[in-house]
Amino acid sequence: MGTLGRAIYTVGNWIRGTGQALDRVGSLLQGSHRLEEHLSRHRTLMSVFDKSPLVDKDAFVAPSASVIGDVQIGKGSSIWYGCVLRGDVNNISVGSGTNIQDNSLVHVAKTNLAGKELPTTIGDYVTIGHSAVIHGCTVEDEAFVGMGATLLDGVVVEKHAMVAAGSLVRENTRIPSGEVWGGNPAKFMRKLTDEEMAYISKSAENYINLAHIHAAENSKSFEEIEVERALRKKYARKDEDYDSMLGIVRETPAELILPDNVLPEKTTTRVPTTHY
């Protein structure tokens, strides 16, 4: 850092220090009516004991999710907003292309009563619905766990099996491939159709694509967000019919054009014209 750089750095420190001092004086004058701001201690990835999460560079972990301890997340997988994956007393493994949706909880057990270790293993292209609880169990490739379902210690959900939303699967239950189980406690309901099995894979693919969009949005800098906000404000409330009458053509900036699979198709309403 040169002489000019050191001078600018010193002035910057002085300005910041002055601002902090003024803030303290203002807070003192406001007394008990002051509003105190506290920094959030939340960390998306957090080590515990000597274990740290290992997340593939192509995976998406939402900013409000918590991935703690001995957790591995594979390529193309997505951990959505509000999820907690806590690998403290044992390990959690999440394969490739799997989605664990908002507010779900994944935990482990050190051992069961028989002394068997109970990590949690989730395979490839698995869909786990919102607010599910997965505890010390195994979910094999291309399985589906519905919203709000609870899987207790030792449960095994085989490949192409489905747990219905809101179900409670008791300890050490094995759900065979191609079957739907549901209820409290969960029991066999019926066989999966070929279309439903194909839907499980399609659901995982859809979430891989959706995760790319959320990852791109979350990676934007503050400056990029402010520029987009200004552009949206500038181009908001433009009446296309009125513009057409005036002969004005407004082009949407490239920055605001989203992929076709994100927004629903726009329907055009034809206004009948009367000829005199």
Image (cartoon, rainbow, N blue to C red):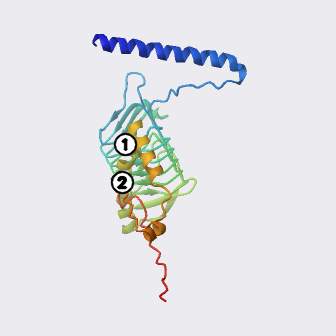
Residue type at the position of mark 2: Pro
- Residue at position x 49%, y 82% in the image: 272
Q: Residue furthest bottom?
A: 276
Nearest to the observer: residue 114 or residue 273: 273
Which residue corresponds to the image point at 36% horizontal and 59% vertical from the top-left? 251
Place of residue 193 in the rendered image (x, y in percent of width and height, measured from the top left): 40, 68
Mark in the foreground, 2 or 1: 2
| Quarter assignment of residue 57 | top left
Q: Is residue 81 left or right of residue 30?
A: left
Give the residue type that dot 1 points to: Phe
Q: Residue furthest right?
A: 32
Query: How far, Cα to Cα, is label 2 from label 1?
Result: 27 Å
Question: Could you say which quadrant of the image residue 249 lies in?
Answer: bottom left
To which residue does mark 2 refer?
A: 253
Question: In terms of image quadrants, where is residue 120?
Answer: top left
Q: Give the number of the disc on residue 60.
A: 1
Give the mark nearest the N terminus, 2 or 1. Answer: 1
